[in-house]
Image: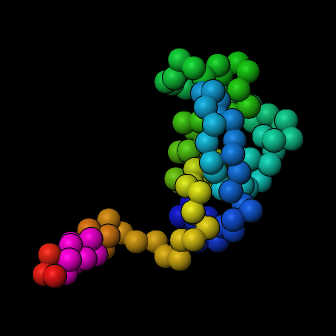
């Protein structure tokens, strides 16, 4: 799913209504297009994890959709993203990010 962030363009970012009743920004894909067209993805609720999610009327299970995306099954899921997701140029590991932040901090402290 991380490739979605590298490939997305500004117009790929859409605001969706999640099954839990809250809006979210996501990277548009075929799964979300099907949801927007009213094509329901049939599911049974395996967890009943959120009180605000009515699985009888929801077009999909949010937990399952996000798990599918994590596994790379984007035909059955999607990725949430921030407003600037289209600006991502590379996927950085947490280790690389922390090293970079520490390096910037040390340089700033020297001045």
Q: Is residue 27 above or below residue 61?
A: below
Q: Toward which corner of the image does residue 41 lie, by quadrant? A: top right
Q: Position of residue 81 (x, y in %)?
A: 57, 54
Q: Quadrant of residue 46?
A: top right
Position of residue 20 relative to residue 102, above or below, is above
- Residue 36: x and y in percent read 81, 41
Q: Give the main secondary structure of the magenta stretch.
A: helix
Which quadrant: the C terminus?
Answer: bottom left
Q: Tell me if I can see residue 95 in this picture.
A: no
Residue 1 located within the stretch drawn in magenta: no
| Picture coordinates of residue 64, whole percent (x, y) | 57, 38
Residue 83, how many percent across, how many down? 59, 57
Q: Nearer the viewer, residue 61 or 96?
A: 96
Q: Please tell me which residue is depicted at 68% across the width and 56% down the height of the picture.
A: 13
Q: Using the image, determine if residue 61 lies above or below residue 55.
A: below
User: Residue at (57%, 20%) from the top-left corner?
Assistant: 52
Which residues are drawn in magenta? Answer: 99-108
Nearest the camera: 80 or 111?
111
Q: Residue at position x 32%, y 65% from top?
A: 94
Depth check: 8 or 3 in front? 8
In the picture, which quadrant includes the N terminus?
A: bottom right
The verdict on residue 100 being magenta is: yes
Q: Is residue 30 left or right of residue 51?
A: right
Q: Which residue is farthest front?
A: 111
Instruction: Point out the residue furthest to the right here.
Output: 37
């Amino acid at each position: 799913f991380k490739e979605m962030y590298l490939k997305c363009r500004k117009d790929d970012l859409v605001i969706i209504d999640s099954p839990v009743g809250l809006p979210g920004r996501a990277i548009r894909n075929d799964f979300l297009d099907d949801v927007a067209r009213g094509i329901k993805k049939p599911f049974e609720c395996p967890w009943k994890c959120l009180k605000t999610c009515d699985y009888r009327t929801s077009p999909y299970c949010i937990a399952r959709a996000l798990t599918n995306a994590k596994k790379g099954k984007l035909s059955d899921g999607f990725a949430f993203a921030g407003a600037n997701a289209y600006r991502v140029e590379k996927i950085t590991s947490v280790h690389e990010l922390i090293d970079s932040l520490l390096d910037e901090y040390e340089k700033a402290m020297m001045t």
